[in-house]
Amino acid sequence: MKSEKPKILYIGAVKLSARLLHRLISCDVNLVGICSKKTPGSHADFDDFSTVVRNKPIPLLKTNDINSSSSIKWIKEIKPDIIICIGWSQLLTNAIIKIPRLGIVGYHPSALPKNRGRHPLIWALALGLRKTGSTFFLIDEGADTGPILSQKIVEIYDYEDASALYEKMTIVAEKQLVELLPKLDDLKSFGRAQNNKSANSWRKRDARDGRIDWRMNATNIFNLVRSLSHPYVGAHFTYNNLDYKVWKCKVVHLGAKNIEPGKVLRNSVDSLVIKCGLNSIEISEIE
């Protein structure tokens, strides 16, 4: 006799998690509930899942605090066998972790145990990394510390900005999730423990991390701009007490050593060239 499909609760709040939810639904799983956020909060790529669940008889909880007593009560009432949590910045407490008998599957867009923590796609681009990862893991009480279930290495190319890397990561994660579905009944048996000696954690970014300082070299500014392009908030600089967002630029080798950083070298209808600490930046999209 064929066993019943495990009951899945899905938690998420961003465009990537919405895409993966679409894929999950298309795989005919036993989806018994969905949690999403009421408001975007700090998520620039927020998605409230309204269009995903439209005309579908799946219970939807909208909450800004997944660890509240009311949220926990709701989760307990639907009795999930497994929880899949993707794109939710709030850590789950032990009160939730112990609810599903099969565990909680988490997702982090880095090659864990490297680069745990906040804003992994942004930091990877801002730091000029050549590789990152797409990792599914079992959630425990730590931050991105649980056993690894699936990991794919993702190359990063110079021509890719946040939007391109976000899309690439989404496609990779969709494939990984589909491959994991037949294994949901036995995830704890094949999870691979992380090596904490190889781990590091990225901190939460704030507005100061997105400010362009023209004393930086042009390559660093280029990486900063592409790291904060859509769907994120955009790198910015201030001129005459106004903030300007830079969405697209490239490194150019213009400007003598005796020209100060921040000097406009060329201004045309289509672009703006500004001297940096080393080399120059040509801005082709500015707001």
Image: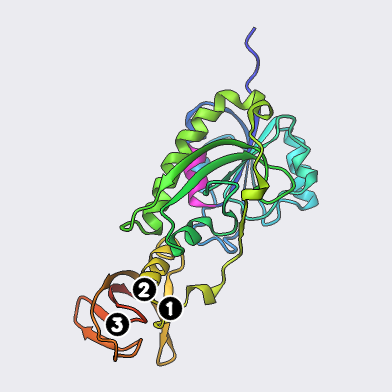
Q: Sequence-wise, which precedes: disc 1 or disc 2?
A: 1
Q: Identify the magenta region.
A: 14-22
Q: Main secondary structure of the magenta part?
A: helix
Using residue 217 as the reference point, say whether residue 173 is left or right of it. right
Q: Residue 114 location in percent, x, y?
A: 57, 51
Q: Sequence-wise, which precedes: disc 1 or disc 3?
A: 1
Mark 1–mark 2 CB contact (< 8 Å): yes
Q: Nearer the viewer, residue 172 or 115?
A: 115
Could you tell me the amino acid type at mark 2? Val
Mark 1–mark 3 Cα distance, whole angstroms, equals: 12 Å
Query: Where 97 falls versus 200 (above or below)?
Result: above
Mark 3 crowd level (few <14, some 14–19, many ≥20, 10 Å Cα): many
- The quarter in which the N terminus is drawn is top right
Q: Nearer the viewer, residue 58 or 220?
A: 220
Mark 3–mark 2 Cα distance, whole angstroms, equals: 12 Å
**Residue 15 in magenta stretch:** yes
**Residue 244 in magenta stretch:** no
Could you tell me the amino acid type at mark 1? Ile
Q: Nearer the viewer, mark 3 or mark 2?
A: 3
The numbered mark at residue 246 is 2
Q: Residue 121 location in percent, x, y?
A: 48, 56
Q: Which residue reaches farthest top?
A: 1
Q: Nearer the viewer, residue 36 or 180?
A: 180
Query: Where 175 falls versus 63 (above or below)?
Result: above
Could you tell me the amino acid type at mark 3? Ile
User: In the rendered image, which residue does mark 3 sit on?
Assistant: 274
Q: Assign a secondary structure to mark 2.
A: strand
The numbered mark at residue 212 is 1
Mark 1–mark 2 Cα distance, whole angstroms, equals: 9 Å
Image point 62% across, 51% down: which residue?
199
